[in-house]
Image (spheres, helix red, strand yellow):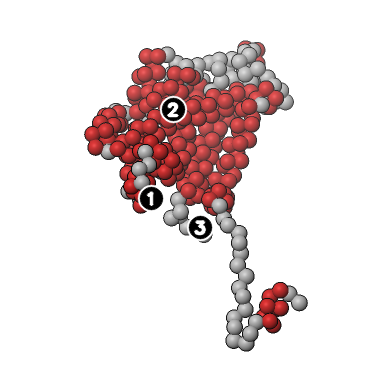
């Protein structure tokens, strides 16, 4: 006889049997994981990005050929057993250059967004929390920077400093913070009016503790989503700069400078194995990161309903 049946027998007539209650508590991380996993494309995309990152880390194993070694005797050779994706006009292995370029694209995206997020966190939090003249000064500076065409400014600064992966990282990061700063400020303005913030102030909790312990953690969710999309934007910007000769210069491998060498009509028509792989890699990587951003938005926003 089950426990429930025994309880029903022993209970007095007219008395409802005791109801068994589940003591399982769903933590915020479990809820986040469930909601993120529900987004199938985001799940597939994060697996793709992890595999891509591993290929970049273990590039010497995945692509054993030297990506910078030239061999003019094998220039523009089609795919074969040795060169899986053929060779470029200098005889360098396209597959090896594709794999080693993963390091550059992902590092540019992560470092550049890391710089811009750090600036955004500081300025957006101070602006939204204190308000008044501090808010006005920071927002006016933000408005001035946002009034200039971002890509043109980045191209100009990189041209003045010289083409380099480090210059590209720094310039994208230092000029990419205004939009995220406004996003964080708006979230801080909302959070600081919540009841528990008022209660913390009333008992004398210092502003610094309120800002970093109570306000900022409750405003960071939109920042995570914006940073994810920012990585995709930084990768596209680096590819565009390298395509124009203002980013990573050969012989260092970059998806952008690989496309730069395929600008002629004859190259596009006769040697598709040379320019299609870097273009496809840019497309898939940016698309995957955007799907991850969508998944994070759905997982972090409690107003989103799951089907």
What is the C-alpha distance between the residues marked 2 and 1? 31 Å
> In the image, residue 14 lies at what x, y percent?
59, 86
Q: Specify few, some or many for label 3: CA neighbours under 10 Å numbering under 14, 14-19, or 20 or more.
A: few
Q: Residues within 10 Å of mark 2 (few under 14, many from 20)?
A: some
Query: Residue 179, can we see it?
Result: no
Quadrant where the image shows the N terminus: bottom right
Q: Is residue 250 found left or right of 85 in the rendered image?
A: left
Single out the mark in the foreground, 2 or 1: 1
Q: Which residue is mark 1?
A: 196
The mark nearer the N terminus, 2 or 3, is: 2
Which one is earlier in the sequence, the residue at label 1 or at label 3? Answer: 1
Query: Which of these two is toward me, 23 or 184?
Result: 23
Q: Residue at x 27, y 33 (%)?
A: 134
Q: Please say whether residue 65 is visible from this viewpoint.
A: yes
Q: Nearer the viewer, mark 1 or mark 3?
A: 1
Q: What secondary structure is found at the residue carrying circle 3?
A: loop
Kindly identify which numbered label has been placed on residue 15: none
Q: Residue at x 53, y 50 (%)?
A: 28
Q: Secondary structure at mark 2?
A: helix
Of residues 4 and 158, the one drawn nearer to the viewer in this rendering: 4
Residue at image point 37% right, 38% down: 206
Marks 2 and 1, the one that precedes in the sequence? 2
Q: Secondary structure at mark 1?
A: helix
Image depth: mark 2 or mark 3 in front: 2
Q: Is residue 137 above or below residue 224?
A: above
Q: Residue at x 42, y 43 (%)?
A: 214
Residue to which mark 2 is pinned: 115
Query: Please, which residue is most extreme toward the front here?
Result: 203
Count of marks placed on residues: 3
How far is mark 2 from mark 3, CA to CA?
34 Å
Image location (x, y in percent) of residue 236: 46, 30
Q: Which residue is mark 3?
A: 306
């Amino acid at each position: 006889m089950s426990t429930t049946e025994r309880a029903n027998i022993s209970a007095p007539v007219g008395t409802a049997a005791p109801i068994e209650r589940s003591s399982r508590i769903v933590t915020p991380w479990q809820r986040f994981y469930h909601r993120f996993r529900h987004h199938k494309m985001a799940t597939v995309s994060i697996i793709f990005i992890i595999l891509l990152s591993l290929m970049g880390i273990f590039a010497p194993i995945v692509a054993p050929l030297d990506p910078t070694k030239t061999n003019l005797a094998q220039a523009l050779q089609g795919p074969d057993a040795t060169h899986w994706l053929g060779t470029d006009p200098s005889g360098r292995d396209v597959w090896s250059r594709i794999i080693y370029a993963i390091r550059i694209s992902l590092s540019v995206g992560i470092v550049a967004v890391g710089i811009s997020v750090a600036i955004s966190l500081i300025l957006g939090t101070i602006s939204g929390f204190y308000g008044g003249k501090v808010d006005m000064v920071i927002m006016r500076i933000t408005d001035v920077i946002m009034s200039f065409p971002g890509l043109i400014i980045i191209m100009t600064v990189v041209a003045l400093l010289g083409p380099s992966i480090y210059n590209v990282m720094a310039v994208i990061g230092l000029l990419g913070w205004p939009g995220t700063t406004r996003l964080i400020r708006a979230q801080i303005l909302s959070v600081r009016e919540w009841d528990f913030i008022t209660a913390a102030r009333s008992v004398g909790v210092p502003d610094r503790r309120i800002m970093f312990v109570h306000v900022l953690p409750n405003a960071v969710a939109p920042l995570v989503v914006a940073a994810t999309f920012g990585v995709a934007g930084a990768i596209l910007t680096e590819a565009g700069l390298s395509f124009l000769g203002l980013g990573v210069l050969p012989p260092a491998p970059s998806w952008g400078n690989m496309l730069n060498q395929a600008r002629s009509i004859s190259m596009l028509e006769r040697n598709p194995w040379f320019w299609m792989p870097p273009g496809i890699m840019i497309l898939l990587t940016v698309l995957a990161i955007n799907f991850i951003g969508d998944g994070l938005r759905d997982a972090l926003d409690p107003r989103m309903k799951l089907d």
